[in-house]
Image (spheres, grey):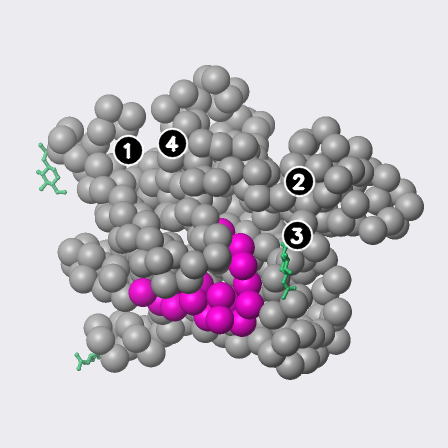
Amino acid sequence: MGSRTCSSAVVLTISVVAVLLNADVALCGCRYKRFFAFGDSLIDTGNFVYTIGNGPSPLKELPFGMTFFKHPSGRISDGRVVVDFYAEALGLPLLPPSIPEEATGQFPTGANFAVFGSTALPPEYFKTKYNFTVNPPSTLDRQLASFKKVLARIAPGAVATRALLNDSLVLVGEIGGNDYNFWFGNPSKPRATPEEYLPDVVARIGAAVQEVIDLGARTIVVPDNFPIGCVPAYLSAHQSNVTADYDELHCLKWYNEFSQKHNQALRQELVRIRSKNPGVKVVYADYYGAAMQFVQKPQAYGIADPLVACCGGNGPYHTGGACNSSTKLWGSPDGFASWDGLHMTEKAYKIVSDGVLDGPFADTPLRHLC
Ligand SMILES: *[C@@H]1O[C@H](CO)[C@@H](O)[C@H](O)[C@H]1NC(C)=O
Ligand SMILES: *[C@@H]1O[C@H](CO)[C@@H](O)[C@H](O)[C@H]1NC(C)=O
Ligand SMILES: *[C@@H]1O[C@H](CO)[C@@H](O)[C@H](O)[C@H]1NC(C)=O
Ligand SMILES: *[C@@H]1O[C@H](CO)[C@@H](O)[C@H](O)[C@H]1NC(C)=O
């Protein structure tokens, strides 16, 4: 029990006991009592669906949620997403979405501020600089503002806030993907432009990391961007008849190289932040590398074709339509990496989170942080 390491066996046992007895969830010996997360649809656990109220949305219907929860859970997935696996590994309950309880919640084990469609940069940035209108449901700024509002209630004052965040784990991302998705998804926009604003996306993520450090956080995990050139929505929208545009895995080279540029800049930004903040642990999580595992060796993971969506239309790569209750599921959702063109199935998220929890896809495997 006094161990500094949350081995998976211990976590599993204790979380079962914790659920049964409603016992202290920190029993597992992991030092993090709370887990806070910021990001977009890849980790939203219900904020966006809550904010659309009673309005209809495919996200409120099966097949969303069919695998694990057996009902739509507010996640853009058939089941769990990466934060759910992290929470399990830390011996914490699944993270509640922040927005439903923003004004009242005590969030004793943390909260998830991530919102579907969020960008790192504010929409004003794109409007002013590029006359480009985007309407993200939230942004990194707005998520942080909401976080500070919650902190002011649950740990009022700088000293209490620092103490609370001292034993919290903070996840900043994945975020920034939508800053590129919105642009690349617009066929009239030159694809060279995002490289020009990429440094601003990375700087915004870095500023958010510094902000939570200044509030008192001591352990921050920052994931990078996925290999977007292997994502069905990109493969479908940017099809090419030029063989050289594809790599040996049939992914779009240019878009994967773009993700790598973002990731390289993010790595450098984190080096800078670490040097400015001795004693603070800033962990880089390599989602790109973790996801490439099943693109490279799909059969090793029981994935039939890693480059097609399992729901979302009859078009190439099974895209071209909404993933909703009446659209075709292409085989078992477990058989494919991607759920609706841009998002992953629980199975794929588990592969990514295992790589980050156990290594080698984090510079400190998250389980070793405990
Ligand atoms: C900005 O974009 C809108 C269309 O979205 C266009 O009508 C307008 O002329 C553009 N403004 C400038 C300054 O380019
Ligand atoms: C923060 O946590 C560390 C152990 O993780 C502990 O040694 C330190 O005293 C704590 N600091 C505060 C201000 O609570
Ligand atoms: C390749 O596609 C372009 C347009 O995307 C078209 O103009 C060209 O004729 C195509 N070339 C071949 C060999 O099909
Ligand atoms: C599901 O999406 C398709 C388009 O892909 C649409 O035609 C259909 O009306 C949608 N069905 C429901 C129930 O939303």
Q: Main secondary structure of the magenta part?
A: helix
Question: Which mark's residue is nearer the viewer, 2 or 1?
Answer: 2
Residue 40: horizontal and vertical position, in percent?
Answer: 49, 58
Q: Residue furthest top?
A: 299
At x 32% / y 50%, what residue is drawn?
Answer: 267
Q: Tell me the amino acid under the disc marked 4.
A: Met
Q: Earlier in the sequence, mark 1 or mark 4?
A: 1
Residue 266: numbered disc: none
Depth check: 358 or 346 in front?
358
Question: Which mark's residue is nearer the viewer, 3 or 1?
Answer: 3
Helix, strand or loop status at disc 1: loop
The quadrant in which residue 197 appears is bottom left
Q: Tell me the amino acid under the disc marked 2.
A: Arg
Between the C-alphas of marks 3 and 1, the distance is 38 Å
Asked whether, in this view, residue 205 is left or right of residue 6, the answer is left
Q: Earlier in the sequence, mark 4 or mark 3?
A: 3
Between the C-alphas of marks 1 and 4, the distance is 11 Å
Asked whether, in this view, residue 212 is left or right of residue 258, the answer is right
In the rendered image, which residue does mark 1 sit on?
A: 251
Q: Earlier in the sequence, mark 2 or mark 1?
A: 2
The answer to whether residue 29 is above or below residue 307 is: below
In the rendered image, which residue does mark 3 sit on?
A: 32
At x 44% / y 22%, what residue is drawn?
Answer: 298
Helix, strand or loop status at disc 2: loop
In the rendered image, which residue does mark 4 sit on?
A: 292
Residue 4: numbered disc: 2
How many residues crowd mark 2 within 10 Å: few (<14), some (14–19), many (20+)? some
- Is 206 within the magenta? yes
